[in-house]
Amino acid sequence: MTEQKFKPGKGIGQTVGVALLGMGTVGAEVLRLLEERSDEFASRIGGPLEVRGIAVSNLSKPRPGVDPEKLTDDALSLVARDDIDLVIEVIGGIDYPREVVLAALRAGKSVVTANKALIAAHADELSAAADESGVDLFFEAAVAAAIPVVGPLRRSLAGDKVNQVMGIVNGTTNFILDAMYTRGASYDEMLAEATELGYAEADPSADVDGFDAASKAAILASLAFHTRVSGEDVHTEGIRDITVADIEAAKAANSTIKLLAICERLVDEEGKESVSASVYPALIPSSHPLSSVSESYNAVFVEAESAGRLMFYGNGAGGGPTASAVLGDVVAVARNIVLGGRGPGESTYASLPIANFGDVSTRYHVDMQVDDRLGVLAEVASVFSEQGVSLKTVRQEGLNDGARLVVITHSAKEKNLEDTVAKLKDLDAVKAIDSVIRMEG
Amino acid sequence: MTEQKFKPGKGIGQTVGVALLGMGTVGAEVLRLLEERSDEFASRIGGPLEVRGIAVSNLSKPRPGVDPEKLTDDALSLVARDDIDLVIEVIGGIDYPREVVLAALRAGKSVVTANKALIAAHADELSAAADESGVDLFFEAAVAAAIPVVGPLRRSLAGDKVNQVMGIVNGTTNFILDAMYTRGASYDEMLAEATELGYAEADPSADVDGFDAASKAAILASLAFHTRVSGEDVHTEGIRDITVADIEAAKAANSTIKLLAICERLVDEEGKESVSASVYPALIPSSHPLSSVSESYNAVFVEAESAGRLMFYGNGAGGGPTASAVLGDVVAVARNIVLGGRGPGESTYASLPIANFGDVSTRYHVDMQVDDRLGVLAEVASVFSEQGVSLKTVRQEGLNDGARLVVITHSAKEKNLEDTVAKLKDLDAVKAIDSVIRMEG
């Protein structure tokens, strides 16, 4: 840890000048609540907040109730102004907010952002700039909106050793998977409905391909393991390929399918630690607390050495919940500006290596159609054992003109499981592999 | 808010001297983990922690692995020592820890405590002393052990307006009620089992009479509503009187019975706000997230204006989880000692009045035996309506030589509900009232 510095407090009763970048759903709600709760915030902070400038991309759009004097399309000049102490970034995107947030931090302004993609991609550079200027960079809203996750990992669990963080951190995909499960509908039908309801964007890729969850997994893993994990380090699979057969397999296994962000501390045979962060759809048993997270709700499950199993649950998206998380950070940061002091910043002292995804262990649930003849089971089982994958349960049942074989493996390395499935496909006795899906929890 | 001050940081790399008060289950685990995780903690803090003294009540008890030089039975002298920066209080009780913690704070030492009874009774005095010296007084472990609740209410939700906090915050009573529900056993049987398993103390009063939960309710209400609420302000009922008939009534209503700590912001007809904190056993519907909290687990449900509904779940007691919460605070406080700065303290600016329990609104579930004759239902219904209590559902069924009447009310004031039940008892037509229990969620 390098020498830490922070600016002296402005003093009790002094006004904190705020720049708001972005006036979408979240920005407008943040602005409304800064007005509505101004007295409470002043009491909690020790001085009033004043929004002195609002950066928007389109100045000609009518914005009723907003003082036009405050609007600007020049965010860079706004954050450099002497009367701005605190910058709230809710623009979205990566390159442009990166430029503006860096400029703000370098000019000695504290920043609160809800931008998960920005943090997942550039936390290193941004944290260094915040440290350099002795200001705060807070981003509770970047993961699971109002559900406190960043704070608990950064502060409450700072005395513990976190071994696993597993979360449902994307509401859109949870809505789709939950609806497929409860209504037996297909992925395409439910994506169409999610789009109609406004849960999914016109281009749903960030959600359904897992990129949004991957950014959050990177942030969670960085905090949990005191190690820099960026979005690129996260093995990411989405839910586009989840079929009705997968859902049926889940039901038969008394499980549900959830898109999970999974961050784990791995320990090899020699006791060497590494970390892994990945996003993929997986079966979790109905008895696991995450299985009952329905609709567009989010939940994050944490396992720490002393604390045991914890779960945080709530609304993980939307204007209100995101604004709540942004404003919680704003109060904390403004308090530091008034009183002096600084919150805990990034801590990456552990710098554990990132494991190859092939070396991460998991369990597989494989549902296949095989010939119904003597010796097939032995043939299939030997493919697993040749790859060093041991079987937990095998269930065989008659099918029209063959047999269905459902295999659940014990925990084994990804690369061995992958090789096993490839070899199964080559077997003459295997007519089709209907579903291959990981199991967690 | 008065002028806030804090001591300058000792500087990166400087050692933080720690005094540990108490060597029970939690104290021993804290000591073990301070040793085991010392390198990680030093990295997270910016300097090493060193336990320089341990206060115990019985010096002659053998304590293997503990340097006898560090032991003392004079806690007051220990906390006054110049080489002590941070005091961890895990003694329990009220009067003696109050004296020692006050002395520590007044001597400029930051304090981390797990003592809910102490905080619920003396937060005012202790916070004032911490403010006066510019040091931290942290107590995450006082509510629900390792489940982050104090931190989220104090920090993450500081930008929101909390309207309700409802929690299962006592593991012993949850174990007893859960076992009564799932096994159909009586209170006495399950208390005996809880005592045998070590969940309940020889004198179980603090748990089963609701006092432990009341301390936690006071702490939660104070944080949520920025208003001083002490243990004495909490209307408290325990679980001793919960009968098998109550459990049966719960099952019939598709609900469970939980001992709840309920903190609410009330708004009267004129818009005037007040707060209420209470502890009592209540029915909650099976669809509510709190209903599935089983065994000795804890969970806290929060409803805030912007964030919506949040839930925090985990182990609410035990050496490991409590040590996790204590150590999270220790890292935060030690970081402030090394780097300078101070965490958010008590904030009671709102100072809302505490509502009379009689003015708090709730719903009742009343299960009674009545005469099976014409006009009885009308007689019973008119008692409710005379008190201004409207009925949501009424279910009547035949009984051996009479009828059973199950009434669920709409929300009404406690005093009116209480009067109603008193008047029902006076009715000739009412032969027995088998169960009167509140409904929440």
Image (cartoon, coloured by chain):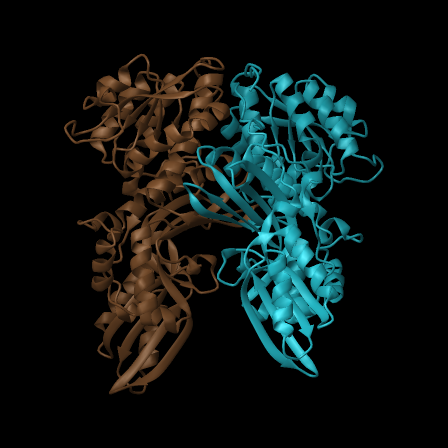
Chain colours: A brown, B cyan
Q: Can residue A38 be spotted in the picture? A: yes
- Say which of B99 and A435 sits in front: B99
- Say which of B119 and B270 sits in front: B270
From the viewer's perspective, is A239 left or right of B186? left
- Say which of B380 and A198 sits in front: B380
How many marks on residues? 0
The quarter of the picture where residue B200 lies is: bottom right
Q: Up-down: is A440 above or below B11?
A: below
From the viewer's perspective, is B63 left or right of A192? right
Q: Up-down: is A414 above or below A310?
A: below
The quarter of the picture where residue B231 lies is: top right
Give percent across and percent down for residue A355: 36, 46
Q: Residue at x 24, y 31 (%)?
A: A64
Q: Quadrant of the N terminus of chain B?
A: top right
Give percent across and percent down for residue A328: 43, 33
From the viewer's perspective, is B254 left or right of A197? right
Give percent across and percent down for residue B215: 67, 41
Q: Can residue B85 be spotted in the picture? A: no
- Say which of B260 and A65 sits in front: A65
Give percent across and percent down for residue B178: 63, 63
Q: Residue lying farthest right?
A: B60
Q: Up-down: is B313 above or below A240?
A: above
Q: Residue at x 57, y 35 (%)?
A: B223
